[in-house]
Amino acid sequence: MRKKEVTSFDIAAVVKELKSQIANCRVNNIYQFGEKTLIFKLHKTDSPPIRLVIEAGRRLHSTSYAEESPAEPPAFCMTMRKYLRDSWLRGIEQTEFERIVTVYFETKTGLLKLVVELFGDGNIIITNEKDAIIQALEFKKMRDRDILRNLTLALPPSIGKNPFRVTQLELQEAFTKATNTEIVRVLARFLGLGGVYAEELLLRAQIEKTKLSSILAIDEIKAIFEALQSLLWPVVEGKFEPSIILDENGDYVDAVPFKLKRYEGAKSQGYESFNQALDEFYLRVVASEKAAGSIETEKLDQEVQRLKRVVAEQEKSIDEDLKKSEKDKQIGDKFYAHFNVLQTFQEQLVKANQQGHDWNTIIITVMAAKKAGKIPSVYVESFDGKNLALNLEIDSFHFSLNLRDSLFDNANRYYERGKHAKEKAQGAMSALQDSKRKLAMAERELSEAEHLKSLKPAEIMEVLSKRKEEMANKEWYEKFRWFISSEGFLVVAGKDTVSNEVLIKKYTALEDVVFHAEITGAPFVVIKAEGNPIGDQTLKEASEFTASFSRAWRENAGSVDVYWVKLDQLSKSGPSGESVPHGAFFVVGKRNWYRNTPLHVAVGMVVGEEACFVGGPLDAVKTKTRTYVSISPGDTMGKDLLKQILKALTVKLSKDQREKAGKISIEQIREFIPYTKGAVNLKTH
């Protein structure tokens, strides 16, 4: 029988490995896949990006595979980002020997805990330092505890005695109390080992698992206790021999942190770490599930059809509004094209009314004159006595002339209606793009699901493995902020104190130029010379990039002083020998200043076979695309700002280009905007 979820031993081994791997990592971002799976993208000095996958009720381990990020993060994912993005992951612990893991994060608001339940249906819960629940994947009331906001988190009742703390005497007492119960069941329940490891313990003690606990001899209890210590020793010492167990057909059966007697003689594959073994194991499990048709393509198809209807209705509404806008403008133009005739006609009617004739009599006279051909027959169609308006037809346009208002006011009314309809259509464009992105994502999921469903597990593994290769092929600078200058130079910036230190120490050469802003809280920005003379334009663009990503942006400043130096002018020792803080450097010698450097960035869209965003200084973005928007410091924040940028970029794209643009995630813009805060300048190209 294939492993379905991690055991307490698995969790103990995973946590032991992860403690040194992920402690003191920065949380760069968080993604959610499906209903229960989160992936934390972590950054650590001098290390490749680390991805921690958490699937409630099933697994927790690092992963080498990169799933394609959803275009629209689910609400729970957005909440996780709100509380934990840009925090520091300080530690990870298993609760006793339970299938519960707590991850500790240092945030700007204090210590937060992420409690992951890996049993049953599972749950993911955020609490504060005092264990008050802030958010949960699933809020619920249960017999023994409640998971509700602001309540103190109560852990589930323990499933057994912690085997790391149990004594031989306590084990003997447990067997005595159990009387006529099979010893394998006693061990599984009393120590919470689960069936696999309870059986393994008895195999090592060389005792039949069905033997009744009431007839165990003292020597046998001692053998069981010693066998338990042999199971616990690798976890205590961190001495693992991870492997995946295969059956006769080569299918995965189990992933184990160390060798088990139950699998002696079975085929196996060894791995460097237990995290890696679990990663490969669950990749194959997911592949097999998909091949078996566990993906509910019917639900995905229903969602695709629903979104198609939404898109069609929105497109129809926009088309109608644009046509109405154009028609109302043309009607307004008709008032001026026939101004003299209409004004004379209106004055005659008003004069007749002022002379004592009621409007019905006047209109009867007009219609009779129309019938006799004494006035242009195309003008008057009918009279609206309630609103005192003539319904006219001119040049095949049908509209009303309000006799109470001047011709100017009548024309302006239609112009305003047309303007409002156009604004309504433009506003609906943003909603349409959101719907198209959701449709594209749903169609992609459906297509992938149908494709994977038709494949064999081995073929699915090949498809999924490509994602691992893509991660390995990323350039070094992609873990920093970066852009290509208009002169073709790579410009790279740190994101925080850790990446500042790494950028200068590991990736900066003597020929490169290093920028910094004259303000606390600014990145180091490096122009990579690569043996070429750096031009004035690149220096200017790098200075703007440095200024914009400094704290001056957050404070809504208009400009800040920026300077550049060479690598050999940077020192980790101050003038009197004192050490410089991590991520900072002392500057020796002359600084080359860019005074009053303005703060602004640009985001552009490049549309080819696919669409993508580009960002950086305005002049650099201009060389890559004609569709861009500039952003200055301002008070619009988060997703509201990202939507404004996307709307400004897509408004002048063609229909085909907008469809391609709708397939990329709005979240990709975030990387280009300092503090995800600012104001969009209206001029878009």
Image (cartoon, rainbow, N blue to C red):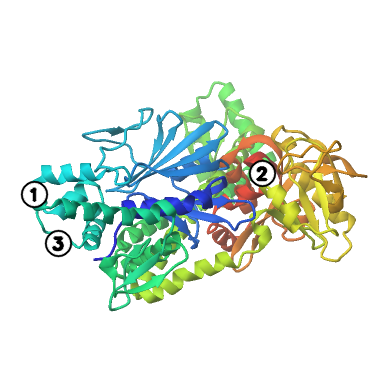
Under mark 2, the amino acid is His
> Which residue is found at the position 37% from the left and 59% from the top?
305
What secondary structure is found at the residue carrying circle 2? loop
Instruction: Give coordinates of residue 461: x percent, y percent.
Output: 41, 72
Q: Residues within 10 Å of mark 2 (few under 14, many from 20)?
A: few
Mark 3, residue position: 208
Q: Residues within 10 Å of mark 1 (few under 14, many from 20)?
A: some
> Which residue is found at the position 16% from the left and 49% from the top?
186
Under mark 1, the amino acid is Ser
> Which residue is found at the position 74% from the left and 41% from the top?
522
Mark 2, residue position: 338
Give the camera-side residue of 578 and 354.
578
Outermost front residue = 219
The answer to which quarter of the image holds residue 253 is bottom left
Give the camera-side residue of 369 and 502.
502
Q: Are marks 1 and 2 in contact (CB under 8 Å)?
A: no
What secondary structure is found at the residue carrying circle 1? helix
Q: Which is in the foreground here, disc 2 or disc 3?
A: 3
Under mark 3, the amino acid is Glu
Mark 1, residue position: 214
Q: Residues within 10 Å of mark 3 (few under 14, many from 20)?
A: few
